[in-house]
Image: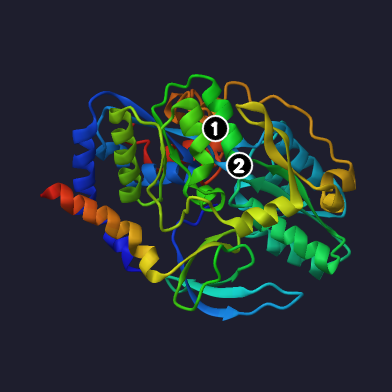
Amino acid sequence: MGQSEDISDPDLIKDLALRLKGLVKRPMKFMEVCGTHTVSISRSGLRSIIPKEIELISGPGCPVCVTAQGDIDAFIETAKIPGITVTTFGDLLKVPGSSDSLAGRRAKGAQVDVVYSPVDALQLARKDRSREVVFLAVGFETTIPCIAATIKDAARDGTGNFSILPALKLMPPALEALLETDIGIDGLICPGHVSAVIGAAAYKPIAEGFGMPCVVAGFEPAEILFALILLARQVNAGRAEVENAYPRAVSWEGNGKALGIMNEVFLQCDTEWRGLGAIRQSGLALKPEYNKFDAKYRFGIETRHTPEPKGCLCGDIIKGLDIPSNCPFFASICTPVSPVGPCMVSSEGACAAYFRYETGVI
Amino acid sequence: MCLAVPMEVVEIKDGDELTSPIALVELGGIRREIRLDIVDRLPHIGDYVIVHAGFAVHSLTKDEAEESISLIRRMADGWRE
């Protein structure tokens, strides 16, 4: 499609960078909430073309990275149960739990299958009714409606050997919890595809309640630069509003159909985040009528609070308090091949993005 | 997990009471079947969809797909003057 070529036009990017430079009158620090933004910023070398006064830091928008250590341990415990096939997005496979990883369990004989979609997990359950198939449900508002639709499928045709282990997260409550502590940022680059579901309006309480400029951004470097220009303009004018720099994918009110399916199947609940701790009403649990699809009840799986790896900075990186290259483990004992924390594992993780694309420049 | 690039709809298979509507989408020669039950607006053949975990989450016409790019371009052109 032509647009990808147009948007990476070097002249356009140069113009946008110049325009941004003209707007920067003091140091500014913006958080890219979404892990896919983090990867795009690192891969495109955006840090080297934006003004030095602008600092970009990662936020809590990598679903694997924010999954609490206790949930990772519960996932690994589930893989130990005989007769269960655990299905997961690939990023979770190598995340270290307290004593093992899913990849480690698989090497020891556990049935752990990587799927691209929760529907693929349901298909596995339908194909072999003799096995219990458990889908490890991590993700934000973009992923949650996909999982809800899959649960509704299973309920509709009575697939009794399929369940999910939910560790789902909602983005606005986490951002509010984060902003209740002063993390010294001047604005938020709001996630593109989470916003396609929840709508740009979802950030209004954050812009107004915290005086925080919020701009929804697409994922191309030019689109991120455009969002930075809108943020810098807000900072200069002393405004704190929600602006949408990704109108082709994100509407003000969001995707009502996706939100409807999500609310049919799930209820808001308190949940624990890596680095951020427990946040009220920031997670989702299956509604009571769907409890038979909850692996926690089905197999009596308990999630305990377990400490994060000692010395690992993933918790601070998720909160925007530090950058990967400041971690003592970064690129030494922690690498994508042998990770200590999830930010080095996930394809959306800040440490993995820095390791792959920025180790030469930082 | 976010596939950032819209994929083109090349075929649509209607659903019934037991199955959901499905689109065959293509990007760079890769074809994939995508569920349409949570998309904001059912796409037509030739439209684009933003795909996430096997589902279309947003549907856009070719013009809409190029809209924000031309907006950025127009702004950039304005700044040059």
Whether residue A341 is visible:
no
Instruction: Locate residue A237, reporting x and y percent.
Output: 29, 30
- Quadrant (top left/top right/bottom left/bottom right) for the C terminus of chain A: top left
From the viewer's perspective, tell me whether residue A58 is left or right of residue A17.
right
Q: Name, please, the residue furthest toward the top.
A: A182
Badge 2 density bin: few <14, some 14–19, many ≥20, Cα 10 Å: many
Q: Nearer the viewer, residue A359 or A67?
A: A67
Q: Please report contact status of discs 1 and 2: CB closer than 8 Å, yes or no.
A: no
- Quadrant (top left/top right/bottom left/bottom right) for the N terminus of chain A: bottom left
Query: What is the three-letter code of the residue carrying label 2?
Result: Val
Query: What is the three-letter code of the residue carrying label 1?
Result: Leu
Question: Disc 2 designates what residue?
Answer: A64
Badge 1 density bin: few <14, some 14–19, many ≥20, Cα 10 Å: some
Q: Give the residue at x 46% y 24%.
A: A322
Q: Give the residue at x 80% y 68%.
A: A126
For marks 1 and 2, the one nearer the N-term is: 2
Dot 2 falls on which chain? A
Dot 1 falls on which chain? A
The numbered dot on residue A175 is 1
Whether residue A204 is visible:
yes
Instruction: Locate residue A36, reporting x and y percent.
Output: 47, 46
Instruction: Locate residue A41, reporting x and y percent.
Output: 37, 43
Between marks 1 and 2 in the image, the one whose residue lies nearer the viewer: 1
Q: Nearer the viewer, residue B81 or A342?
A: B81
